[in-house]
Image: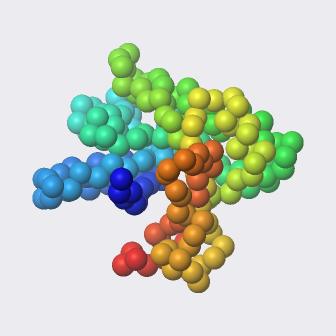
Amino acid sequence: TLQYGGIVLTFDDWFVDQWHTFFTDLKTTNPEITPTSTFFVAHWLTDLKGVNQGRYNNDSHYVKLKQLENAGHEIASHTVNHSGAMDSPYNLACDKATQYMTDEVQPTLATMAQGDPGLNNDDGFIPKSFAYPFGDRSAFYDNAIKINTGLRYLRGTLATDFATPLKDTNAIYHKRTGATYPYLIGDGLDTVYQNRSEE
């Protein structure tokens, strides 16, 4: 059988309005394109706006995220405060891995499951994936998160090899057949990662 490659696009942080507008417009202007992406969302208690912050119905971030999910996209975890594992007080220290998971990962999973805190309905999210803010991680942190949550996939990013084009960055390519990846690595397309959007 033929094996086809693909690209997984992921979007980080809390830019729900931008994501929703882009994918809604794409469906209208190019209905033949049906991409599915993963949105790693942070700041569930502050930057996501719902009924409790005056965003109702189709203006609510929770409604928009649910619409993206219903269109086949994954709504995933990106910590509750957007704190990186390299940030203080964690500093990627082995003995702080469980604290990081307790402080940043478990609270966001609980908040995601709750959905819009201003409503009592079924608008929650149960993610399968988690992305480290700023991409820094270690096996100790991976293990603490995997053992204590239902998350299947963990993603970090490369931020060190700026000279290599994406097509030659072997670490970001993963074989599907017969392989499992407890940890996935990606690269970025913004100014921090110095990759051109033309790539």
What residue is shown at x 48% (from left), y 44% (from top)?
41
Instruction: Tell which residue pokes out farthest to the top in this image.
Output: 120
What residue is shown at x 35% (from left), y 57% (from top)?
2
Quadrant housing the C terminus:
bottom left
> Which colour assignment does the render follow?
rainbow
Find residue 123 and report its horizontal and vertical position in percent.
Answer: 36, 25
Instruction: Tell which residue pokes out farthest to the bottom in this image.
Output: 163
Front-lying residue, 81 or 137: 137
Q: Does residue 82 appear anywhere in the picture?
A: no
Q: Does residue 98 appear anywhere in the picture?
A: yes
Instruction: Tell which residue pokes out farthest to the right in this image.
Output: 95
Front-lying residue, 154 or 88: 154
Measured along the vertical axis of the image, is residue 84 above or below residue 99? below
Find residue 141 and report its horizontal and vertical position in percent.
Answer: 74, 44
In the rendered view, does 129 fall on the left or right side of 50? Answer: right
Q: How many marks?
A: 0
What residue is shown at x 42% (from left), y 40% (from top)?
75
What residue is shown at x 42% (from left), y 56% (from top)?
8
Find residue 70 and report its horizontal and vertical position in percent.
Answer: 28, 35
Measured along the vertical axis of the image, is residue 166 above or below residue 158? below
Find residue 189 and report its horizontal and vertical position in percent.
Answer: 46, 69
Quarter of the figure with residue 150: top right
